[in-house]
Image (cartoon, rainbow, N blue to C red):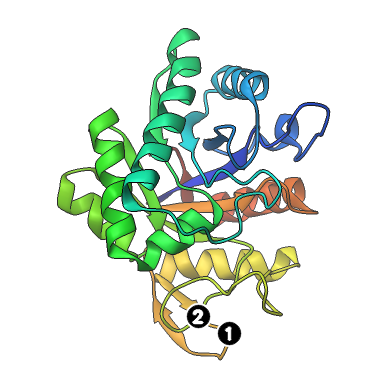
């Protein structure tokens, strides 16, 4: 039987501001990517999210992003490769401290937002991100956009990698995600999201915005926890995968 991981970006609340329905969505996912305080989250939120994931036997990953709380880490930033490396080390280390202190084990690292999308195409950025993950712990799994430079960089340095696909995002012909600034970047109905997920998992193909069918590898599926219908999306997709005889399990 086929197997796939179902991951969600979590711990994105900040102080008094609550983002996402973490307590509800945690019951139907297998991996949690926890914001590390730069694009979202704070120390207390990080600790609470780690405990929440551990209580539900959900694998925990670090979700480091650009230092951009105002833009939620979704704005491109011009940093040196050394600065990107340092951002990764700092944030992975911070989350790992909470995981270790609670008796858990950090499972993976998934860059966030603009950092993730830029590293999908930029070989230099991909390599320093992979190097940072490897230097912290070579046993960590590196999550990256399916078939991207980030996946290739992880493989070259000796990391386990996970090709990630998105339930609620549309794709371009080159395999990249449609930028959020463009119309049609988001899939808004459960039906369309489920059809895309099943096609990616079962057939290893996805239909792009211009109708072209391209190959894709799906080791893990992302559902955005801050989406308007995130909980319902997660439950319906989990149910559809099970009904289609796909095992939903963390990597």
Q: CA distance from mark 2 to mark 1?
A: 6 Å
The C terminus lies in quadrant: top left
- Asked whether disc 2 touches disc 1, contact meaning CB atoms under 8 Å apart, the reply is yes
| Residue under the image location 47 percent in, 30 percent down | 59
Percent x, y of residue 113: 55, 54
| 43 with respect to 3 (left or right) | right
State the residue in front, 32 or 152. Answer: 152
Marker disc for residue 192: none
Percent x, y of residue 120: 39, 63
Residue 150, picture quadrant: bottom left
| 75 with respect to 245 (left or right) | right
For label 1, the crowd category at 10 Å Cα-Cα, with few meaning under 14, some 14 to 19 and many 20 or more, is some
* Earlier sequence position, callout 2 versus callout 1: 2
Work out whether 162 lies above or below 93.
Answer: below
| Residue under the image location 72 percent in, 47 percent down | 226
Work out whether 90 lies above or below 79.
Answer: above
| 176 with respect to 181 (left or right) | left
Percent x, y of residue 147: 33, 66
| 9 with respect to 93 (left or right) | right
Mark 2 element type? loop
Percent x, y of residue 49: 62, 24
Work out whether 190 lies above or below 23.
Answer: below
Mark 1 element type? loop
Q: Is residue 137 visible?
A: no
Residue with the mark numbered 2: 172
Q: Is residue 124 visible?
A: yes
Marker disc for residue 209: 1
State the residue in front, 87 or 94. Answer: 87
State the residue in front, 143 or 83. Answer: 83
């Amino acid at each position: 039987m086929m197997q796939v991981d179902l991951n969600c970006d979590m711990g994105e609340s900040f102080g008094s501001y609550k983002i996402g329905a973490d307590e509800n969505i945690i019951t139907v996912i297998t991996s949690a990517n926890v914001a590390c305080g730069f694009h979202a989250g704070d120390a207390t939120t990080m600790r609470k999210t780690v405990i929440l994931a551990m209580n539900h036997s959900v694998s925990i990953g670090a979700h480091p992003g650009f230092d951009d709380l105002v833009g939620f880490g979704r704005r491109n930033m011009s940093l040196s490769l050394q600065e990107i490396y340092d951002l990764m080390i700092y944030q992975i280390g911070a989350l790992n401290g909470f995981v270790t202190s609670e008796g858990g084990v950090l499972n993976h690292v998934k860059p966030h937002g603009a950092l993730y999308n830029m590293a999908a195409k930029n070989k230099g950025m991909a390599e320093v991100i992979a190097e940072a993950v490897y230097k912290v712990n070579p046993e960590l799994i590196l999550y990256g956009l399916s078939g991207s430079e980030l996946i290739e960089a992880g493989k070259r340095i000796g990391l386990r990698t996970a090709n990630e696909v998105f339930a609620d995002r549309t794709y371009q012909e080159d395999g990249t995600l449609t930028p959020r600034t463009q119309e049609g970047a988001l899939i808004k109905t459960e039906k369309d999201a489920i059809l895309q997920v099943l096609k990616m998992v079962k057939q290893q193909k996805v239909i792009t915005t211009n109708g072209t069918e391209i190959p894709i590898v799906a080791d893990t599926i992302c559902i955005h926890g801050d989406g308007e219908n995130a909980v319902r999306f997660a439950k319906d997709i989990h149910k559809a995968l099970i009904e289609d005889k796909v095992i939903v399990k963390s990597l």
